[in-house]
Image (spheres, rainbow, N blue to C red):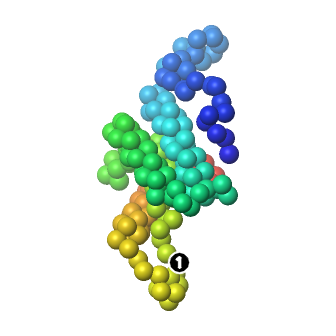
Amino acid sequence: MIHLDDQDVPKIEDDDFIEDEGGPHAKQTPDRVHIDYFIRSVQLFEVTGEILSRHYSIKAKHSETAKSETHCAEALASWLQSCETYMRWRPSAHRFWPALLSMHYYTNLLLLHRIHVPKRNAAAEGVRISDEMMDSIATAHHAAAMITSIIEKLIEQDELRFTPAFV
């Protein structure tokens, strides 16, 4: 896992996409959607790293789960709030890049909330499901449904073949 504290590379910015070294691509204007997709993906993958390191790594401290879960939830909410409206996926106005970005967002949301989803035999084992667990279960189910909707739309538009292999 890459720790952001261990690097000294500045965060990527819009100016990084301007070709200023000449050559065949020097006169091409970068597509705003591609730039925003890339920058937003990098920001979202930073949150992914936080979720994985705080909740799914060997070094994750279970005593700090609630505090780190709140931190990760706030980071996801902040990311979504700062994301441009045109980069958010809507089924009625499907576009490939917002769909892919939204799929990454909902995958993070699912990772964060699946921690509280009880195993199938939880009721038989006498596990009591709290209101907090019910909220997380509902959020995880919503995230999974959104991922499914996005995949179905990508299939319908014959765009699934353009997605990364891990999709």
Q: In x, y percent, where is residue 62?
A: 56, 61
Name the residue rendered at 64%, 25% in the picture: 8
The residue that appears at 46% across and 53% down in the rendered structure is 67
| Quarter holding residue 145 | bottom left
Q: Is residue 133 visible?
A: yes
78 left or right of 26? left
Residue 94 % position (x, y): 38, 48
The answer to whether residue 23 is above or below residue 51 is above
Q: Nearer the viewer, residue 69 or 35?
A: 69
Q: Is residue 16 above or below residue 53?
A: above
Q: Residues within 10 Å of mark 1 (few under 14, many from 20)?
A: few
User: Front-most of 105 and 2?
Assistant: 2
Badge count: 1
Q: Is residue 43 above or below residue 22?
A: below
**Nearer the observer, 103 or 130:** 130
Question: Is residue 106 or residue 118 the one in the foreground?
Answer: 118
Look at the numbered disc 1 and give the secondary structure of its residue.
Answer: loop
**Residue 72 located left or right of residue 9:** left
> In the image, what residue type sits under mark 1?
Lys
- Does residue 103 appear in the picture of this structure? no
Residue 23 in percent (x, y) is at: 65, 13
Residue that extends furthest to the front in the rendered view of this protein: 63
Q: Residue at x 49, y 30 (%)?
A: 35
Report x, y in % for residue 144: 45, 63
Query: Residue sitting at 66 percent across and 33 percent down?
Result: 6
Most extreme residue toward the bottom is 124
Residue identifier under label 1: 119
Position of the C terminus by quadrant: bottom right
**The N terminus - image quarter:** top right
* Relative to 89, 127 lies left or right: right
